[in-house]
Image (cartoon, helix red, strand yellow):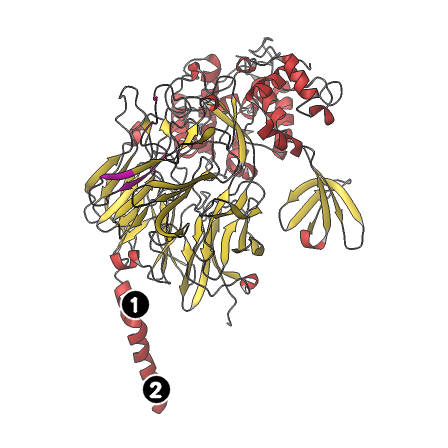
Amino acid sequence: MNLRRHAFLIVVSALIAFGIPGILRAQGANEQMLLHPPADSWPGYHGDYSGRRHSSLNQITPQNVATLGLAWAFQTDQSAPLKSSPLLVDGILYFTVPETVWAVDARSGHLIWHYNSPASQGEHIGNRGVAIYKGSLFFLLPDAHLVSLNANNGTVRWKVEVADVGKGYWTSMAPLVVGNHVLVGVSGDFDNLTGYIRSIDPETGATQWQWNSTPPTGTPNQTTGGMAWMTGTYDPDLNLLYWGTGNPTPVLNGSTRPGDDLYTCSIVALNPDTGKLVWAFQVSPHDTHDWDAVETPVLVDADFHGEPKKMLMQTSRNGYFFVLDRTNGKSLLTVPYGLVNWSLGVDPQGRPIPNPAKEPTPDGRLIAPDEGGMTNYRSPSFDTKNGLFIVNAHPSWSVYFAKPADGVYGWAGADYGVWGKGVIEAIDYQTGKIRWSHEIGPESGAGVLTTDSGLTFTGDGGGNFLALDSSNGKTLWHAGSGSRIVSSPTTYELDDRQYLLTSSGGVLFAWALPQAQ
Amino acid sequence: MNFLLSTQRLSTWRGRARLAVLLLVVSAAAAQTPTNNTQSRSGVKQTPTVSKTYPPDLVEQGKALFRRDCSFCHGRDAGGGESGPDLTRSKLVTADVDGDKIAPVVRIGRPDRGMPPFDRSDQQISSLVAFIHTQQNIALTGVGGRGGVGGRKGVDPSDLQTGNAEAGKRYFEGAGGCAACHSPTGDLAGLASRYSGLELEEQMLYPRHAKSKVSVTLASRQTITGTLAYMDEFTVGLIDSTGTYRSWRTRDVQYKVDAPQNAHVELFPKYTDADVHNLMAYLQTLR
């Protein structure tokens, strides 16, 4: 009896210690969880709102990472590669490919439910994942519809159109939930279309506001484009939403859109409640090389040259690393993080000055980097411990062509990559100097995750998952994945066990330290 | 109908597969019945073939599927999009007969070039094949092909004739350092008969198909040399003189890679655009 009473007390204590937060979390991802994600969650595309992809988890360390082993794997049994960052809420992982969402037990990798909505229209190039708010998921379909699903079982709550697929729009990004707003952006580079970010009511699907990055199609001497096809970040203290916008259209021919082409290739700060623009910083004025500025606008609070600053950092597709004061959008640092040959330098506002002689021509211009850029959709990470901005970079060369016969619609030219490679670079954010670099063979689509224990997780161009020492870039662990990696790693802790999640091809892998059976 | 055999390119489908594909193309093209011989825009003799028409329903179905799964990389009109080659100028498409070349690429993908495999039914692949061939026919007859909206556009050999061959020769022999490895009467003799237009320029800038040699020294001091077949941080693999693949953990051996094509990478930041065009003009004289 004594033993039983003892056991009862332990259970009661456990309920008090863990049960109450557990009950709260069973309501799904509330505002508090999104603002301060617990260790057993990854409730948004970037994990938290900062876009740093830096975890405080420290069970897996530089000393023990060599013993990391497979905890489980989930096979999607279909051919679309996984590009999404799995969300984790209440022990359930949610991840996607175009048209499809899987809900999987984060402890075992077994399927809980599966949603599929065949869409005959729209680009099926990829999907980066869902957003969650309370008990609902938000998922963008290739045909530019947003569907809300019940997170318990995948049933449809509502479905709304966010753009006209018939005009050439599609959607692929993971929505971002901020307060009572589901924020979505659109894609569409093959037509001269206006890019925008739209805020949608999580309960009803009604549009709350829309911010257009470019004027309406057909406005004389004005650009179109500026597609907001990646997920932004958010500063709750400033109540500002930060988002990158895509390239102008026509893409390679700038003749019909003289000037800077605002707000394409820009980092914009919006009020999430109204959609009003607060400031904008253009990283590529008058782009003619398809260099979207949609790469994660990473939010960092730290000293900059001895002064505490609220900063925003981006390794942009155009080859430059930008540090901005995110309260006002003023430049703190602009410096290339690889070889670029398309600019005449940097203007007093910190913007690269495009060299007109490097615009595409009928006989071709040799350009660094290539169209895919010095980096792209893959997430970088800011290692708060070492003060390093770590990015999977792609030094590269290409030839860009455009001639009158190519017209002024959509692509309006041609470009051909001739050479490139992959390098993981650790950038000192105060100077832009490369602290260490780690060659990874051909270009890799793997993003970066850093942890407080001093680890950098990423992947190489041969499909190996890698763990590097964040202080010097040395390899500490690897595992061949059997396919190309085009996703960013995440991590979480469940049952006192830290998991690393990576994916390649159609397989999601969960890694953990060995445990007794 | 003239298929521009010599001017097509495999673009981003690079590397090892390329040579094999070229061989396939040559044999397939030779098997076709020529109806007449004509000169292409590049001035190189073509082997024409008879175009096939496909049922409109099948083409429409293929178009819808192509827009879903293929058009981001290959363009909506199959004329090239972000990163993917222009299929209307693809040698593989030209050589394809009812999907015999295209279907395996769709099903297996090009893992080395970032193209994923697509698990599609025979009927779906037939529709894609019908659409791709139809787009090629349209592009080659000039009916809407170059005007096909939105997609990446082609580069004609005539676009690449702005250089000065004399200046290119001086660059080849002097500043470019090309003559250190290449000779117009040796390895480059007849180059312009083998390559033309954009394909020649791409080869000139970086010869993707060039093989590297590697010599691996084992702990026993035995040295094995061969053609580099695989290399990452952890594994080095080669094809030895008997045609056998062998690999080692990099930590267990010493190895030395001989990749003279890397000299091309060192040239990139040194070129002016005029150097590129002049060199191109000079190489086109090596017939």
Residue occupied by mark 2: A6
Left or right: residue B147 compared with residue B91:
left
Secondary structure of the residue carrying tag 2 is helix
Residue B204 placed where, x, y %? Answer: 63, 24
Q: What stretch is highlighted in magenta?
A: A255-279
Q: Is residue A295 above or below residue A219?
A: below
Instruction: Say which quarter of the image contains residue A353.
Output: top left
Question: Around disc 2, counting alpha carbons within 10 Å, would you say few (fewer than 14), some (14 to 19), or many (20 or more)?
Answer: few
Question: Around disc 1, counting alpha carbons within 10 Å, would you say few (fewer than 14), some (14 to 19), or many (20 or more)?
Answer: few
Q: Quadrant of the C terminus of chain B?
A: top right
Instruction: In this rendered view, identify the residue nearer to me: B39 or B183.
Output: B183
Q: In this view, does B148 lie above or below A389?
A: above
Left or right: residue A334 compared with residue A165:
right
Disc ID at residue A22: 1
Of labels 1 and 2, earlier in sequence is 2
Say whether residue B271 is magenta. no
